[in-house]
Image (cartoon, rainbow, N blue to C red):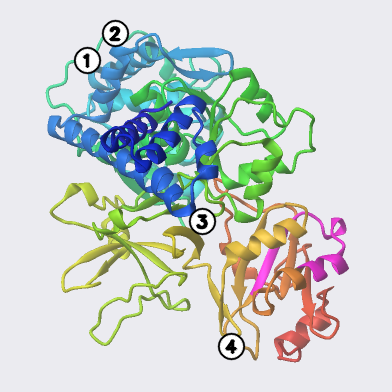
Amino acid sequence: MDRITVAILAGIAGLAFFYGKSVLGIVLALPALWTLLSQNGTLVAAVLPGPLRRFVFRDLRAGVASVFMAIDYLIVSKQNISFVTIFERNARKNAKKVAFRYNDTEWTLERVDKYANQVAHYFQSVERLKKGDCVALIATSCPEYVAIWLGLNKIGCVTALINCNLKEDALRHAITAAESRVVIVGADLVENYIPVQSTLEDIQKSLVFCESGTLKYDGILPVFDRKIAAMPETKPEVVDPPRYFDRLFYIYTSGTTGLPKPCIITTHRANAYVCAHHYLIGITKDDVLMCTLPLYHSAGGLIAVGQALLFGTTVVIKKNFSASKFWDDVRKNKCTVFHYVGELCRYLLAQPPKPNDTQHTLRVCYGVGLRPQIWTEFVKRFAIPRIAECYGSTEGNVGFLNIDGRPGAIGFTSRSLEFFKQQFLIRVDMESNEAIRDGNGRCIVCKANEPGELIGKISTGSKFSSFDGYLQKEATTKKQLRDVFQQGDLYFRTGDILMKDEEGYIFFVDRTGDTFRWKGENVSTTEVEGVISRLANDVDVAVFGVSVPGCEGKAGMACISGSDSKVNMDSFSAGVKNSLAAYARPLFLRFVPELEVTGTFKIKKGALREEAYDIGKCGDDRVFFWDPASALYKLLTPADYERLSRGGIRY
């Protein structure tokens, strides 16, 4: 049982004791006793009335977690220490605790620390790097990956965690945007790096990383593993050590709408991310956490591995996600926690059912992007005791966490949290993405069940709610909104459209850039993608708005991964008609062999949106259009396209 649950139970028991033998005392004592005996709050949740259940298992728990987080913040910020210093304390206290499992090896906290020390010594004594210098790390997931950026943090250097799938211009941009001085590249990724190496004028050295000999390399670049093997395992002496608000590393945006931008991650931000998930979800040092996400993003590379570094949780690191092997890996490692992105859950559901689907040790799955359409099915098929859906962004200063398992919700806001007035949903124009203002020039807060863009207050005098933003100042400025509720105030624009219901639960609606307007209605691409994916046998789907001659607004178009031969177009058409309002139905379908995705499974829509339904640009892909006469999707022929282009088909 985690500390927050114990604290809540202690509080309830205290109230029961205070009220003695009164009826209220009995009412308060029974749930506490029941929970203590069962160690499973869901039993109590089933008998408590809605408002009381929300208070105990949502608001009260969040309040207690917030106290733990505040205490943690006050201690480490007052001491003004870095992320790696917090890790070192944990490593000294729990030296033999297994931090990472990778393939058939185990890395204790002590082993991670010693490797990090060797990294620090090398860059301090050989490369002569100083505080603030940046090293670009391009490698696939493994324990050494984490130890490398920890070692660099020991001497105050910043690590640019670069997407290992990048090539050519995108890779060059990522390295130069971070103002890197040294590049460490995995032996299995050297062929992507060599073509851009000669164009990187400011790089003083390029090193090849071989995962302690696991990977083979026979080229001319120096091997990083050999360099650090000769270094001491003791902690290096540092004259100017990193501090709490200093930079730890750069994590890049996903690059779905352009070149990735490096986001600044300080110790303060990193510590807050890790602690928030630890306390709110109730992760403990006795848990075993399955991490199949790439370590160059905040989900896997910070929030997941951070549980090992700061709290001693064992994290199972996988180089890649495998839907067919996932449950076997969970059983083998006796995992109790799984960090997902929603697409992974869909991939698991797409696997053929097995008799042992429910035979596992997972007690909680947490992450982002679990669509409401598959939430219940995922929980039911695999007997998942608890889902903790989260919301946040790498660079943002606002976030939510659904700690009581409300299906479809990404979190909640209670009245106690609203007191601080740090985050709001405001009305925006879905076409221009501009904030709607009243007669006084101020933004308008949304009412319950009204979609709006989430914004977070930037307190210039408080680093606690700061917005560190991106390394490039102009990119940071674009995400800021001024004079929101009063002259001179400043807010961070998330670019996400959310909705809050009467009970305070928050639901994701869409991205501002993806939402489009058709027939006078705003269309949520997220909702439509979920429906189309289900009707097309749970495949990847990208939905966006396209212009139609003679029509105002933008009509929906869905790009579907796979062949149309696997889809019965008559039943598919009927399913779309029955599942979606007329304005939300895509007028165009395009079947593509594969949809290009980022490392965190976000679909890249830019090129698809540009090509739209122009069959001259779609190559061999088959494109269908909604025929108003038959109410069916039909293959778009050159004659049909010509008719559409001159407004001959009316919608």
Q: Upstream in the sequence, badge 3 or badge 2?
A: 2
Give the CA distance from mark 1 to mark 3. 40 Å
Q: Upstream in the sequence, badge 2 or badge 4?
A: 2
In the image, is residue 502 above or below residue 202?
below
Q: In the drawing, does residue 570 fall left or right of residue 111?
A: right
Residue 361 sits inside the magenta stretch: no
Which residue position holds label 1? 236
Which residue position holds label 3? 256
| Amino acid of disc 1 | Pro
| Amino acid of disc 2 | Pro
Q: Upstream in the sequence, badge 1 or badge 4?
A: 1
Total marks placed: 4
- Disc 4 or disc 3, which is closer to the eye? 4
State the mark number for residue 552.
Answer: 4
State the mark number for residue 232.
Answer: 2
Residue 571 sits inside the magenta stretch: yes
Q: Upstream in the sequence, badge 1 or badge 3?
A: 1
Check whether the beta carbons of the residues at disc 2 and disc 1 lie within 8 A of each other.
yes
